[in-house]
Image: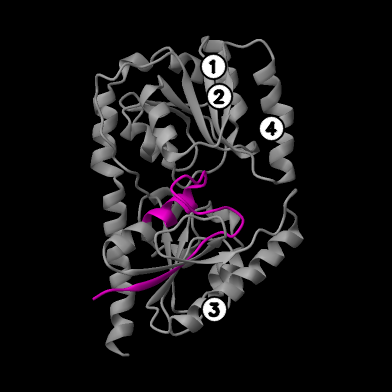
Amino acid sequence: MPLTVLNIAYPLAPASPDSVGGAEQVLAALDRALVEAGHTSLVVAAADSQVAGQLWPVAAVSHGVITEEDKRVARVQVQSAIDAALASWRAIDMIHIHSMDFAGYRLPVEMPVLVTLHLPISWYPLDAFDSAGANVHFCCVSQSQRASAPARLRDASVVENGVALLPFSPDTPRENFALTMGRICPEKNQHAALEAGTRAGIPVYLAGQVFPYREHRDYFEAAIRPLLLSPNPGHRFLGPLTADRKQELLARARCLLHPTLAPETSSLVAMEALAAGTPVIAYRSGALPEIVEDGRTGFLVDSVEAMAAAIAQVARISPADCRAAAEQRFSRERMVAEYFHLYRALTEPARAYA
């Protein structure tokens, strides 16, 4: 039986296949999969989002640095969009929230609510979990994330993220550059990738977005820009990329560098690299040891020096092994199927008593 699902995004970043943020990419993938499967997808997200279903837009609230007041105004707009969607579509089966502000919204207590926890557990207010109603079900995106959760979440579902498995040839020639990609901010630590590339004598291409938060902009100016301007082996800042351009670069790169300091819950970019047959050299942060098989699909390191040394060893890694790991564990189809199974489990009891 067809479902009607209301997805709620973080309102200050657009949801689309080209989004930099993992939560926005996952929401966009589920939205498209719902429509392609004959379900109804409703999405509350930033006005410049690209969705397959019906968008309930949240207008931009700032053209400069995002402030706490901007966030408050955005939450008010999200609540208004939720209310409008619920009033217009009275047959909504469930709500799926991808934003960390899940506890701040007024939602029907009789409707199943799924909250995917895309961020580290410690980044959420702990009282938000304790105050959640019986109709709220939590989903983690990795085993390590659930293991770090308080007792209230130890029975949460786990659906690992997944990525598109585009055509792949193990004989595609690799070029002499490394990539580092994602939100450009202090916890992602991209300047360490540039420093490792300098030590290894290889250009590093930095792709991603500097979101309008003061600490993100300050990090780029203080830590990133000097490494782009100073003598280096050809480092470049590419800015945000479309999904197609990202896949093209991943297929050509010698390796992906991921020196994140954040307790990563997952890593779509690491999965995308493996799907392109590209080894990943990453810090041992959060769930990354679940994704990168040290010595088989890349290397796990703990410092700039070790990352530079690992760059010199990536020729030992088989692109075919990287792709095989992605096919076995990280396909988008597997992720969508697991979410659809969870949707059914949450909605069928409610429908039985309707």
Question: Which image quadrant for residue 276?
Answer: top left
Q: Which region is colored magenta?
A: 1-29
Q: N-terminal of the two: label 4 or label 1?
A: 1
Query: Where residue 270 sits in the image (x, y, percent)?
Result: 41, 36
Residue 56 in view:
yes
Q: Residue at x 58, y 21 (%)?
A: 236
Disc 1, SS: helix
Q: Mark 3 to mark 1: distance in Å? A: 50 Å
The answer to whether 217 is drawn above or below residue 140 in the figure is above
Q: Mark 4 to mark 1: distance in Å? A: 17 Å
Where is mark 3, residue-wise?
84
Where is mark 2, residue-wise?
193
The answer to whether 173 is drawn above or below residue 335 in the figure is above
Is residue 348 highlighted in magenta?
A: no
Q: Residue at x 41, y 22 (%)?
A: 253
Instruction: Name the front one of labels 4 and 3.
Output: 3
Q: Nearer the viewer, residue 126 or 79?
A: 79
Q: Mark 2 to mark 3: distance in Å? A: 45 Å
Which residue type does callout 4 highlight? Answer: Phe
Where is mark 4, residue-wise?
220
Where is mark 1, residue-wise?
197
Q: N-terminal of the two: label 2 or label 3?
A: 3
Q: Label 2 crowding class (10 Å Cα cut-off): few <14, some 14-19, many 20+? A: many
Q: Label 1 crowding class (10 Å Cα cut-off): few <14, some 14-19, many 20+? A: many
Left or right: where 212 falls relative to 352: right
Left or right: where 51 falls relative to 124: left
Q: N-terminal of the two: label 4 or label 3?
A: 3
Query: Where residue 188 sits in the image (x, y, percent)?
Result: 58, 36
Q: Mark 2 to mark 1: distance in Å? A: 6 Å
